[in-house]
Image (cartoon, rainbow, N blue to C red):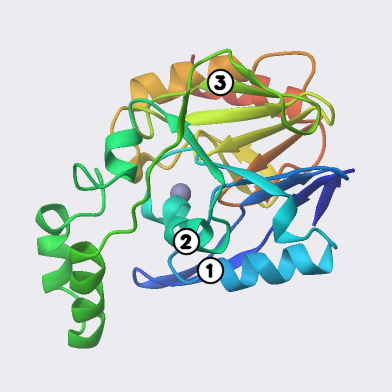
Amino acid sequence: MRIAPGVEMLELVAEGFGGRSVLHPTLVYDENEAVLIDTGMPGHWDEIEEAMDELHVPISRLKAVILTHQDLDHIGSLPEVVIAKKDIEVLAHRLDRPYIEGDIPLLKTNLSVMKTFIKTMQQEHADEMRRLCENLPKAPVTRVVEDGEVLPYCGGMEILHTPGHTPGHISIYLQKSRVLVAGDAMICVHGKIEGPVKRTTPDLTSAYSSIRRFMRPDIDSVICYHGGAAVGEPKAQIEHLMKELKV
Ligand SMILES: [Zn+2]
């Protein structure tokens, strides 16, 4: 779905974890370069490639992948991306880097955390989950990004460190199209912006103060990884959300 010229919100269906959900990586591109923000679950790369094909964006144009954070549904296809495009830059925040690189197990998807959950699953799903936890996706982060940094890609991408959902969670503001890619700092439900999912956000206090970073006059559209694009006036929605959450 086209959000603005050169900003495509992708739609990937993820099965598993006891349900079906739709994930929304963002592809930002112009005639010279393209950047993928988040990579879906393991096995999603083929669909991302297909979507790029339809947009006539060749893989040779893909310069970087930016990871909003370490969660499995965001880094899932990263190993496939770095195989498909060997010289690609992989960008993430310093605090989530060791998880993405596999030095420490992912905060939320690892064997010790998932043990009790796995016990409740059907055998076949339990085996799949165990296999996944033993082979978590990983790849080297070639460049760490800091809060306030502006990456030169596609007319400028401003990095906002928005911790809470994970310590190194970032959101990305696309300067040319005035689109905010919120990652999991917020979600969208039927086009309406809501706060982050409580169950999967270990530090809610930080997560709520991170939303304050989105109070700015220059946001025309918001893409949430879960739930997609906000419908209507995103600035008013963010303001309303802040009142609701009392931040
Ligand atoms: Zn997520």
Residue 7 in the figure: left or right of residue 39: right
Residue 76 in percent (x, y) is at 42, 59
Q: Which comes before the other along the chain, label 1 or label 3?
A: 1
* Label 1 Cα neighbours within 10 Å, binned few <14 / some 14-19 / many ≥20: some
Q: Nearer the viewer, mark 2 or mark 3?
A: 2
Query: Mark 2: which amino acid?
Result: Ser
Q: Is mark 2 on a helix, strand or loop?
A: loop
Which residue: 38% across, 28% down?
168
Query: Mark 1: which amino acid?
Result: His
Residue under circle 1?
A: 44
Q: Can you tell which quarter of the image residue 163 is in? A: top left
* Any part of residue 243 in sight: no
Residue 93 in percent (x, y) is at 43, 28
Residue 153 in percent (x, y) is at 72, 31
Q: Distance between the residues labelled 1 and 3?
A: 26 Å
CB atoms at circles 1 and 2 under 8 Å apart?
yes
